[in-house]
Image: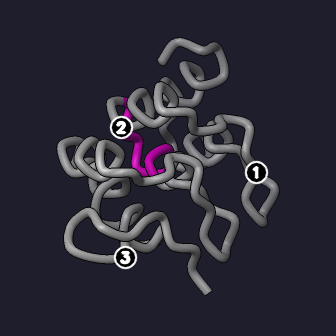
């Protein structure tokens, strides 16, 4: 099961996987802002324990990560593989981003 982020914006329920893959994961900053402005939970978790921040970090999207952090996303959240978003970024080759996350520079 995938946790729902919210109902209402974009005409219905939006799931974490949709939010992550279609917005945060693809670097769609405007869509992320729109969803958050309409009640999306920046800390929502899917069935794999992935937060939207994990997805954005995996894609190397600094701007989206900054937005999510300002909206209360937990940079210390761990997924089911026990990885924090910064660790995923590092594993996927986004070293400067991982360093910024760890040093609170975003």
Q: Note whether 5 is above or below 27 in the view shown.
A: below
Relative placement, left or right, of 90 versus 69 is right
- Residue 61 among magenta residues: yes
Which type of secondary structure does the marked residue at label 2 adopt? helix
Mark 1: few/some/many CA within 10 Å (<14, 14-19, 20+): some
Residue under the point 62% across and 62% down: 45
Classify the position of the N terminus by image quarter: bottom right
Task: Choose between 23 and 83: the one closer to the eye.
Answer: 23
Relative placement, left or right, of 77 versus 16 is right
Residue 49 point in image, percent of width and height: 69, 65
Residue 98 point in image, percent of width and height: 57, 30
Residue under the point 66% across and 22% down: 102
| Magenta residues, dominant SS class | helix
Query: Which dot marks residue 64?
Result: 2
**Contact, mark 2 vs mark 1 (Cβ under 8 Å):** no
**Contact, mark 3 vs mark 2 (Cβ under 8 Å):** no
Q: Which residues are the magenta region?
A: 56-62
Residue beneath disc 3: 13
Residue under the point 47% across and 18% down: 106
Which type of secondary structure does the marked residue at label 3 adopt? loop
Which type of secondary structure does the marked residue at label 1 adopt? loop
**Which numbered disc flags the more N-terminal residue, 1 or 3?**
3
Residue 59 point in image, percent of width and height: 40, 50
**Which numbered disc flags the more N-terminal residue, 3 or 2?**
3
Mark 3: few/some/many CA within 10 Å (<14, 14-19, 20+): some
Q: Note whether 20 is above or below 11 in the view shown.
A: above
Relative placement, left or right, of 81 versus 23 is right
- Residue 35 among magenta residues: no
Residue under the point 60% across and 15% down: 104
**Which numbered disc flags the more N-terminal residue, 2 or 1?**
2
């Amino acid at each position: 099961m995938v946790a729902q982020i919210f109902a209402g914006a974009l005409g219905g329920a939006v799931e974490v996987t949709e939010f992550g893959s279609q917005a945060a994961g693809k670097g769609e900053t405007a869509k992320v802002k729109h969803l958050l402005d309409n009640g999306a939970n920046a800390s929502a978790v899917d069935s794999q324990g992935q937060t939207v921040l994990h997805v954005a970090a995996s894609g190397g999207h600094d701007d989206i990560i900054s937005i999510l952090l300002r909206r209360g996303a937990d940079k210390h959240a761990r997924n089911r593989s026990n990885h924090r978003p910064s660790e995923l970024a590092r594993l996927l080759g986004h070293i400067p981003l991982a360093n910024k996350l760890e040093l609170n520079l975003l």
